[in-house]
Amino acid sequence: MIRVGALPPVSNCVVEPEMYKMAPEDVTIHFERLILPKYPSLSSPEQEVVEIEEFLDAMVEDAPRAARVLAMIQPKLRVIAYACASGSFHRGIEFEKRLVQSMEDASGIPSITTSGAVIQALKELGLKKLCLISPYLEYQHGRVIDFLIANGFEVVASKGLGLAIIEHHQQPPEVAHDLVMTTCRGVDCDGIFSSCTAFRTIEILEEVERELGKPMVSANQATMWLMLKKAGVKERVSGFGSLLRHL
C-alpha cells in the first residue's frame, strides 16, 4: 500500500472527494486541514486584497504544523501536498519554493504544492498558450495569470466567476463546464487550466477534452498527478483527463 498526504484549507469540501475518486486502488490519501483564524469578510473592495492575503498567509503559517502531523503516520507517507492553488501562488515563484522547503523541513517528507504541480503538469503536456478559468474574485484571478506568465506561459483567454472564497466549493461541475465553453470554445490555445482546488472539475475533464479536442488541467488533477509521480506510482489513471495517463 502506498500512502500520500494532502493539506487542504479547512473551508475546502472538494479536495478530499476528488482525490479519492482519482486514486488508484493501492494508494491511500491522508489529510490534515489547514486551520484559519476566520474567513475573509470581503466587506468592501478596499478590504478584499488585505483580507485574502491574511487568509492565505495564515494557511501558509500553519503548513509546517500540519505537515508534522502527517509525518506521524506509519508506514511513512511518500509525499505531502499543499492542496491549495491560490495559497501557493499568491506571492510568486520563490514563495512557492520556500513553502515546499518549510513543509519538508517540518516533516522530513518530500513535499509539493498545487501551483508547483500545475506548472509541471502544463509542461508535461506541452501546453504553452492557455485558456484559464477560475471561481476567483478579480484580484485572485489576476494573481494566477501573473503566476502563469512568470513561469513562461501565455494566457490567451480567461474568465473568473468573481465568487467569494466560501462560495467556491458550492458550485456544481456544470458551472465549470459552462465557463470553459463560453471562455475557451474557438480560442487558439494549446489547452485549458482550471484553477482552485475547491472548484469541482474532475467530472468534466474527459468531456471537455472530447468537445474541444485539447487537454484540460485542473488544480486537484495536477496535484494528484504529481503526488503519484513523486510516490513512484506507474499505473495510469483513466477517466479524469489525459494528464493522469502520463504516469
Image (tube, rainbow, N blue to C red):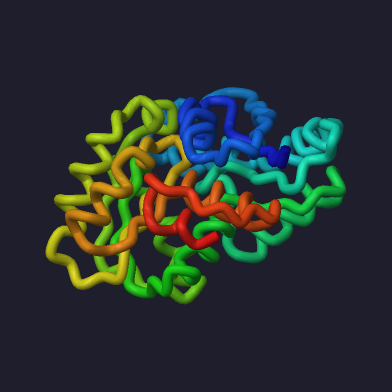
Percent x, y for residue 170?
A: 35, 25
Figure quadrant of residue 66 = top right
Q: Is residue 240 left or right of residue 25?
A: left
- Image height of 83 relative to 152, above or below: above
Whether residue 9 is visible, yes or no, is: yes
* Residue at (63, 57) in percent of width and height: 229
- Image height of 93 relative to 143, above or below: below
Q: Is residue 5 left or right of residue 179?
A: right
Q: How many marks?
A: 0
Figure quadrant of residue 177 = top left
Whether residue 140 is visible, yes or no, is: no
Percent x, y for residue 192?
A: 32, 59
Figure quadrant of residue 96 = bottom right
Instruction: Between residue 91 and residue 220, name the one nearer to us.
Output: 220
* Residue at (55, 49) in percent of width and height: 223
* Quadrant of the drawing holding the C terminus: bottom right
Q: Is residue 230 left or right of residue 88?
A: right
Q: Is residue 13 left or right of residue 240?
A: right
* Residue at (72, 48) in percent of width and height: 79
Instruction: Between residue 107 and residue 154, name the one nearer to us.
Output: 107
* Quadrant of the drawing holding the N terminus: top right
Percent x, y for residue 189?
A: 26, 70
Percent x, y for residue 188?
A: 20, 72
